[in-house]
Amino acid sequence: MKGGKVTVLNETERKVLNWANRRGLIEGTTAEKQVIKLMEEVGELSEAVLCNNFAETVDAIGDCAVVLTNLAAKLGVSLAYCYETAYNTIKNRTGKIINGTFVKNR
């Protein structure tokens, strides 16, 4: 794996990877196809949030996480590595909430 990180976030990520591998979803796809799938899932997430449907929102977040897990694996890294990399980028970030959105200081 790139970056030398092979650890998984948790047992569920391991289960998702096993499920995806058994179905050829890592080897049989491209990063581009996974991004398209992610956008589809984000659309479903948006609809669920806008309709205030908690159960569908939770399901859609999970679907996005599954696709991100597959995409990360396709790129040779783990979701845990991506998550840790993002955290290391933001952990010291400062800013404020403006109209419900965090705006980082420059």
Image: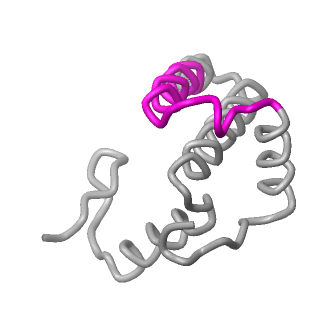
92 or 103, nearer to the observer: 92
99 or 20, nearer to the observer: 20
Name the residue at the front extreme. Answer: 27
> Main SS of the magenta segment?
helix
Q: Residue at x 47, y 37 (%)?
A: 31
**Quadrant of the snapshot with the C terminus:** bottom left
Q: Residue at x 53, y 20 (%)?
A: 40
**Quadrant of the snapshot with the N terminus:** bottom right
Q: Which residues are magenta?
A: 23-45
Indicate the position of residue 57 as horizontal and vertical percent values: 67, 30
Q: Quadrant of residue 22?
A: top right
Q: Residue at x 74, y 32 (%)?
A: 24
Colouring style: one colour
Indicate the position of residue 20 as horizontal and vertical percent values: 77, 38
Q: Residue at x 64, y 30 (%)?
A: 28
Residue 32 in magenta?
yes
Residue 44 in magenta?
yes
Q: In the drawing, does residue 92 fall left or right of residue 76? A: left
User: Measured along the vertical axis of the image, is residue 73 above or below residue 52?
Assistant: below
Q: Quadrant of residue 92?
A: bottom left
